Image (tube, rainbow, N blue to C red):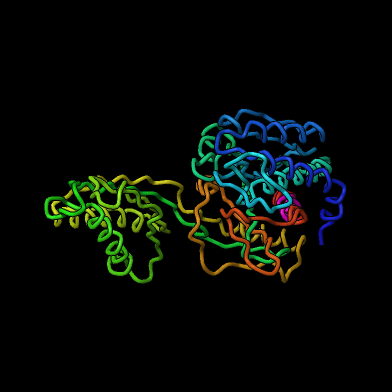
């Protein structure tokens, strides 16, 4: 077993306070100025150099070993969500309409813990560890502009981790190959002809058209895809109408498409556009279809995954590291990193008795889970540099 968890106790209260400070002042994508300032203050306190204002709010710290060697990248995301927190929580957001509902406050503080641990070992390190504090993971893909700024140049292997609400505390999951989906978005504006609700024969009702599109769209998954392919098509928003007795001119449908292969990723939006357009024309209406590709599929490198599994076993024990059999339909912009560097993304459990739901006002977890997170990432770097 590793000695890092014991060494982590030296920093735990400071890291806990840092996480609470970040949690109380959540910031959305590319607005993480206060969060970055808190990270920089901690790095200053332990004497770790860094470059700031990378991709607006990103911070890149560097721990150089005494001897030459490889370069390992560790990454954490810093942004929060546009969501009001459950007021009953003991640890509260002080900013209305914003909260850390996905664990990024813990990712950031956990990577700071990893920085402190690695800094203690720097005289024994062969090579360099690069610590990537990234903005805007949730919706804007902050990893991509950081890569464009050069953060992955010369990197031999990369590791990232996510606190995971459906996995028990002190347990870890890894996966070779595709781990998380491409989380694309779409919008369909259904255009009809509005009028009096009592005279539908004089209108082209976009609500009826939109309803037919929503119901029939699922046939794309069940009848246009190979049954062995995995994909999700979900409508998340419907907007239309202003009064009980008025048929509107337009209805807007907004949703997401989740896929694991480029072939399926290309197919579904084409089929959805054709289906929506055909249904609308059958009623005498029309549609405007907008498709927004977002992050790529997160694909883990086999060697990096085995490295991360072996390293986390030293932190949480052999029996508590598990290889996932199935990927997750969630999206994660660490996928941009895994496209250019051999990488492993790791789930670190925070569940006690029941699942903790991400992106929910009641999302909450215990601070001690930052120890396996931070120690595990630090151990990944130390072992990979050997």
Q: Is residue 205 or residue 93 the one in the foreground?
A: 205
Q: Is residue 133 visible?
A: no
Q: Is residue 385 or residue 312 the one in the foreground?
A: 312
**Residue at horizontal 31 percent and vertical 46 percent from the top:** 242
Horizontal side of 290 relative to 180 (left or right) equals left
Q: Is residue 278 or residue 252 the one in the foreground?
A: 252
Horizontal side of 317 relative to 107 (left or right) equals right
| Residue 108 is a magenta residue | no
**Residue at horizontal 24 percent and vertical 47 percent from the top:** 248
| Residue 375 is a magenta residue | yes
Q: Is residue 313 visible?
A: yes
Residue 195 position, x and y percent, is: 18, 47
* Total marks placed: 0
**Residue at horizontal 58 percent and vertical 56 percent from the top:** 358
Q: Main secondary structure of the magenta part?
A: helix
Tell me the quarter of the image containing the N terminus: bottom right
**Vertical relation: 45 (above or below) 335:** above
- Magenta stretch in the rendered image: 372-379
Residue 348 position, x and y percent, is: 67, 59
Residue 133 position, x and y percent, is: 64, 39
**Vertical relation: 318 (above or below) 49:** below
Q: Is residue 383 or residue 83 the one in the foreground?
A: 83
**Residue at horizontal 57 percent and vertical 50 percent from the top:** 342
Residue 145 position, x and y percent, is: 52, 35
For residue 347, what is the image quadrant? bottom right
């Amino acid at each position: 077993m590793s000695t890092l968890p014991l060494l982590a106790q030296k920093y735990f209260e400071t890291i806990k306070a840092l996480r609470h400070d970040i949690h109380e002042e959540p910031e959305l994508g590319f607005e993480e100025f206060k969060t970055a300032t808190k990270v920089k203050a901690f790095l200053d306190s332990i004497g770790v150099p860094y470059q700031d204002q990378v991709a607006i709010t990103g911070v890149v710290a560097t721990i150089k070993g005494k001897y030459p060697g490889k370069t390992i990248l560790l990454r954490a995301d810093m942004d929060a969500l546009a969501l009001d927190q459950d007021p009953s929580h003991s640890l509260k957001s002080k900013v209305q309409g914003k909260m850390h509902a996905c664990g990024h406050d813990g990712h950031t503080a956990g990577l700071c813990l990893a920085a402190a641990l690695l800094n203690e070992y720097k005289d024994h390190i062969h090579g360099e560890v690069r610590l990537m504090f990234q903005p805007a993971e949730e919706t804007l893909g902050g990893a991509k502009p950081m890569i464009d700024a050069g953060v992955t140049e010369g990197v031999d292997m990369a590791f990232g981790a996510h606190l995971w609400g459906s996995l028990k505390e002190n347990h870890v999951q890894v996966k070779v190959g595709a781990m998380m989906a491409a989380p694309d978005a779409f919008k369909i504006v259904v255009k009809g002809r509005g009028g009096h609700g009592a005279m539908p024969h004089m209108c082209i009702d976009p609500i009826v058209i939109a309803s037919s599109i929503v119901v029939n769209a699922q046939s794309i998954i069940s009848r246009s895809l190979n049954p062995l392919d995995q994909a999700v098509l979900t409508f998340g928003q419907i907007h239309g109408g202003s009064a009980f007795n008025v048929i509107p001119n337009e209805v807007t449908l907004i949703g997401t498409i989740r896929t694991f292969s480029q072939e399926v990723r290309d197919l579904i939006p084409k089929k959805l556009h054709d289906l929506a357009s055909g249904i609308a024309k059958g009623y005498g209406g029309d549609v405007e279809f907008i498709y927004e590709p977002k992050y790529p599929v997160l694909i883990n490198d086999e060697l990096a995954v085995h490295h991360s599994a072996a390293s986390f076993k030293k932190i949480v024990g052999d029996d508590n590291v598990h290889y996932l059999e199935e990927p997750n339909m969630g999206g994660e912009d660490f996928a941009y990193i895994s496209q250019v560097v051999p990488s492993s993304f790791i789930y670190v459990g925070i569940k006690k008795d029941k699942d903790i739901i991400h992106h929910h006002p009641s999302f909450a977890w215990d601070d001690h889970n930052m120890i396996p997170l931070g120690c595990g990432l630090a151990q990944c770097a130390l072992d990979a540099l050997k």
